[in-house]
Amino acid sequence: QKEVEQNSGPLSVPEGAIASLNCTYSDRGSQSFFWYRQYSGKSPELIMFIYSNGDKEDGRFTAQLNKASQYVSLLIRDSQPSDSATYLCAVNMDNFNKFYFGSGTKLNVKP
Amino acid sequence: EPEVTQTPSHQVTQMGQEVILRCVPISNHLYFYWYRQILGQKVEFLVSFYNNEISEKSEIFDDQFSVERPDGSNFTLKIRSTKLEDSAMYFCASSGDKNQPQHFGDGTRLSIL
């Protein structure tokens, strides 16, 4: 059974703080990893993607991948109230033509 | 910026009726997908489509479901005989390659009465 696991939260952080979101996946052969943001009632919006071990930075966002530990994370620096949303981790397992999604972590950024 | 468009935004249908959900993927993308999200639950893969045929499908995508690319721009999901449990948000997505990010449309909210 292929699984993507996320802590459902809510994760509450004060404005300006760093938010750290975590995701584990079951399939060691997974090759591509994605973070989406989903506001309530809206569609998933791509935030970051990462293919190689290590860190990848894009503005206030950093994705971190550790394939040996089957772990991918998303750091959001200088968190803003507008970052309040559910963050979805998606993994392309076995190089199949589909994504497995986690249940998402709800992030609350308090002004 | 190019985007995936879906119509209608909301579809209300009687149980047992057929419904067709429509999508226009990003024009230079080659891979197309349908996902669904039941209220409060995770996004679930239904089917992927490449080179005019289904490349992957989930156990959810049974005989009542079908997909079609009737012309060079549209990608449709048909549910033949809808059930109450088909009520969900249905998202279309497209990507340039199977390992590349998938870009999602705004979704169709399907309500079965």
Image (cartoon, coloured by chain):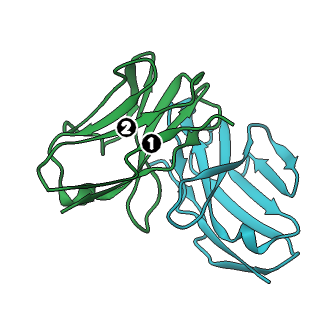
Chain colours: A cyan, B green
Q: Residues within 10 Å of mark 1 (few under 14, many from 20)?
A: many
Q: Which residue is mark 2?
A: B22
Residue A80: numbered disc: none
| Badge 1: chain ID | B
What amino acid is at disc 2? Arg
Whether label 2 touches label 1, CB < 8 Å? yes
Mark 2 element type: strand
Q: Chain of mark 2?
A: B
Q: Earlier in the sequence, mark 2 or mark 1?
A: 1
Q: Is residue A52 left or right of residue A96?
A: right
Of A44 and B55, nearer the camera is: A44
> Could you tell me which residue is drawn at 80 percent across and 51 percent down?
A64
x, y percent for residue A20: 77, 67
Q: Viewer-proximal residue, A44 or A69?
A: A44
B77 with respect to A61 (left or right): left
- Residue A37, horizontal then vertical, whole percent: 64, 58
* Image coords of residue B100 (percent x, y): 65, 32
Measured Cα–Cα span from mark 2 to mark 1: 6 Å
- Residue B58: quadrant of the picture: top left
Mark 1, residue position: B6
Mark 1: amino acid: Gln
As drawn, B34 above or below B42: above
Same-subunit check for callouts 2 and 1: yes
As displayed, is residue B27 above or below residue A108?
above
